[in-house]
Amino acid sequence: MRNNLNAWAVSENHFPSFGSIKEKFKFFVRYAILAPSGHNTQPWLFEVHEESLNLYADRTRALPVIDPDDRELIISCGAALTNLLVTMKYFGFEPDVTLFPNDTDNDLLASIKVKSRDYQPTDEDKIFFKAIPNRRTNRLPFAEEIIDEITFGKLLKAVGDDTDIKFAKVESSEMREELTRLIEQGDRVQSQNKSFCRELAQWVHPNRTSSKDGIPGYAFGMGDLISFGSPFFIGNLNWGDIQAGRDRNLVKGSPLIAVLESKSNNPADWLKTGVALSRLLLRASWEGISASYLNQPLEVPELFDKVRDLLKTSYHPQMLIRLGYGKQVKATPRRDVEDVIKIA
Ligand SMILES: Cc1cc2nc3c(=O)[nH]c(=O)nc-3n(C[C@H](O)[C@H](O)[C@H](O)COP(=O)(O)O)c2cc1C
């Protein structure tokens, strides 16, 4: 296994049962960093104290072109927060979480104290925890097999009962077609934006990269040779048209297109969106369901409003997700836990 994939070799057998509380917290963070993040920037920092843990947004890893308000950055941190919380619960630590605990520090996203150390994990907690090392973003085509209503119900339940967050199917064929057009437009607008291409090229790497962040070409289905030239292809050739064609086919072949929405479009709800996103993806992974994203129109302001109008929702669409049954794909790199943790 390449060094930059070491993080995935974490195992519950490594739990430091006789270690200090700080060592235990560090172990929990090893599962938090397996969360998905936009462009695999891993924009999180964890500060470990004697009796608590703080989660910070690492805005030095922001994507100012695609994500100028740090919306996706905060969603990514929310996903890491879920992984942290389910891991704590699995090992009997009942978390007491305060989101945005400090009005004057908007980088401090969550403070987690331990309410008790004899928590009994539920079956759902166990499922979430066990799914963490197997979850991947799968951008390849899916099988035709549909996701039945019982399974969809499990995904819906996993999202949680926070009324600030909604998870809905995009069902009618007219709506799917219109959404596909908006996704294609998003691809074209982004591909024509030189700053967008330059930013993306910095985070897409050849397959044999030793980089601990960013996306290796294989995650887009590229072979080794093609992946070597991937930063060059971005922004050259007819990249927008090629991507639009690919995405049309992906939507067409996806049994389920769904949207994760939040009541407000502010950092608190972005964080909650990330929390719900990871719960959804973990449950999906447990059910053998793959997922990837079609967020392009939500990243282009003029298209964001069109998606919202199309969905006829009073909420704010945050993530467009395709789900279905796919082949197993490779994990992407992660930074070492030591790079994202500060022991106070
Ligand atoms: C908030 C957020 C937005 C994302 N947006 C996209 C996207 O628009 N297109 C895409 O292909 N992947 C997207 N991803 C997936 C990431 O690129 C992926 O999580 C990352 O490369 C790490 O890979 P992994 O999920 O397989 O661990 C997004 C992930 C998150 C958390």
Image (cartoon, rainbow, N blue to C red):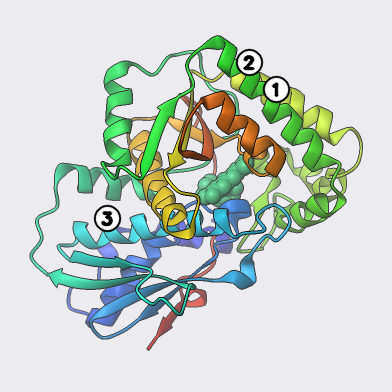
Residue at 71% x, 39% y is: 302
Q: Image quadrant of residue 86?
A: bottom left
Which circle's residue, 2 or 3, is located before the other in the chain?
Answer: 3
Label 2 to label 3, Cα distance in Å? 37 Å
Residue at 48% x, 72% y is: 106
In the depicted view, which residue is nearer to us: 266 or 28? 266
In the depicted view, which residue is nearer to us: 80 or 311? 311
Q: Is residue 331 visible?
A: no
For label 1, count other residues whose C-alpha is less than 10 Å away and answer few (under 14), some (14-19) or many (20+): some
- The residue beneath circle 1 is 181
Residue 335 screen position, x and y as percent:
54, 66
Q: Is residue 53 above or below residue 290?
A: below
Contact flag, marks 2 and 3 (Cβ < 8 Å) = no
- The residue beneath circle 2 is 177
Q: Is residue 159 above or below residue 58?
A: above
Q: Is residue 291 visible?
A: yes
**Quadrant of image for the N terminus:** bottom right
Amino acid at dot 2: Glu
